[in-house]
Image (cartoon, coloured by chain):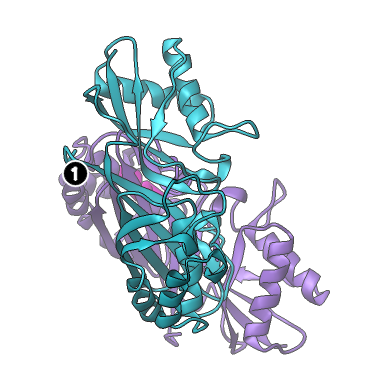
Chain colours: A purple, B cyan
Amino acid sequence: MPRFRMTVEYDGTHYVGWQRQENGHSVQQALENAILSLTGETVSIRGAGRTDSGVHALGQVIHADFSRSWAPYKLRNALNAHLGLAGERVAVLDVLEADESFDARFSAVRRHYLYRIISRPAPLAVELKRAWWVPKPLDHERMHEAAQQLVGHHDFTTFRSAHCQATSPVRTLDRLDVTRAGDLIEIRASAQSFLHNQIRSFAGTLKLAGEGKMSPADVKAALEARDRAACGPVAPPEGLYFLKVDYADGL
Amino acid sequence: MPRFRMTVEYDGTHYVGWQRQENGHSVQQALENAILSLTGETVSIRGAGRTDSGVHALGQVIHADFSRSWAPYKLRNALNAHLGLAGERVAVLDVLEADESFDARFSAVRRHYLYRIISRPAPLAVELKRAWWVPKPLDHERMHEAAQQLVGHHDFTTFRSAHCQATSPVRTLDRLDVTRAGDLIEIRASAQSFLHNQIRSFAGTLKLAGEGKMSPADVKAALEARDRAACGPVAPPEGLYFLKVDYADGL
């Protein structure tokens, strides 16, 4: 059975999250429905990351097996046509034929996320549900300094949801950079894998650092506490974007 | 009566346009309703530009007269609270007390607009209603070259809606630049004032230039024809953003 690897974009506002679940419409379901209406086949797809409700993706990666071969561009266009007819806020950006050993989740060597904060007195109109609105001023240089305390190989129990299913709280965080352009503060995070709510927990804690409520040393102490209670409030999902996944083949 | 000048952002998707009209909810009405619910006063506000339905603003400027004075930040926060309660997609970014000679429309010395095109095979998910999706590749350098044929003092009859109410089709276009960053093509237009549908007419014509269907010389000939029939298709409203207004006081 030919296996296809696809890069997928979605507006997470309209979904219960990536993963198929009982209580509402998921991105996975939207894609599986599109495949069913295109091919008549019920397939199960796997994504590189299980994003929560409200979290967006500009470069989620999935794989799925089809019973017949397709020219990749025809498969992309046909799936987008079916997604559009169904009124989904999901688009297939790119399709590649993949080796049967390729697994969107388990072959991933690095995942990249972006967290967007808009810091200004006025609420969001154009960017509503596309960024976290923080009305108080934030010192992004202090946020970046605090973020550097978290980079590296650590036990991230402090920054992990109580619902996280990972067997170990230890991860290697390769990058956590905070930059600013006008009112927009961007946090960029890269690692082979993340714990559930890890980046939103980072963002909530770094916001406290930006407000002057936590020093970089306080953030380091929170990490070392290995205690969920030491974490700042979890930042809302609408600021988070799943940007990109790296695989060993470099494609 | 104290006069206030305000910078306003809105998502045009949800409105029939800037101007109050019979057939639906306008941005002007949303702001006038917020002022009424805050002060109990029925005021008539004036905007620097009358954007169409679907057109967004990041920096529309308005003025309104109030019966009593307000600390500007309090007025901003109170209006945003009322807009939020009403579920409007409008935000007041900034409030300044203005001289009674200030008129948001007639004092404007330059208006700046942005037109966003996303050129890629896949439809838009995250940017739906926030940019014009063009599936075919576009040559942005050719678009920029064609745009330069339009800069200057000209009769813009070709690029003017049949419904345009301006007394003269002559305008001075100060800038029409086309740049690209990845899939995103941005057209930036500046002039003291624009004709109705002028920028969307430019964008539709420049898209034909980007596809190779019009040369820069063809665009120049279209301008010189002073004939609406020589214009490319008018680009859709969702790509257009009213960015900024300059006034002689430099504020």
> B47 or A102, which is in the foreground?
B47
Secondary structure mainly formed by the magenta segment = helix
Rendering coords of residue A170 (x, y %): 37, 61
Rendering coords of residue A94 (x, y %): 56, 78
Residue B48 position (above or below residue B115): above
> A215 or A187, which is in the foreground?
A187
- Whether residue A26 sits left or right of residue A123 in the image: it is right
Rendering coords of residue A112 (x, y %): 39, 66
Residue B114 position (above or below residue B76): below
Which residue bears the numbered disc 1? A139
Magenta-span inclusion, residue B216: no
Chain part drawn in magenta: A200-205
- Whether residue A63 sits left or right of residue A179 in the image: it is right
Res. A147 in view: yes
Res. A228 in view: no
Give the chain of mark 1: A
- Whether residue A133 sits left or right of residue A85 in the image: it is left
Residue drawn at 59 percent across, 53 percent down: A17
> A98 or B122, which is in the foreground?
B122
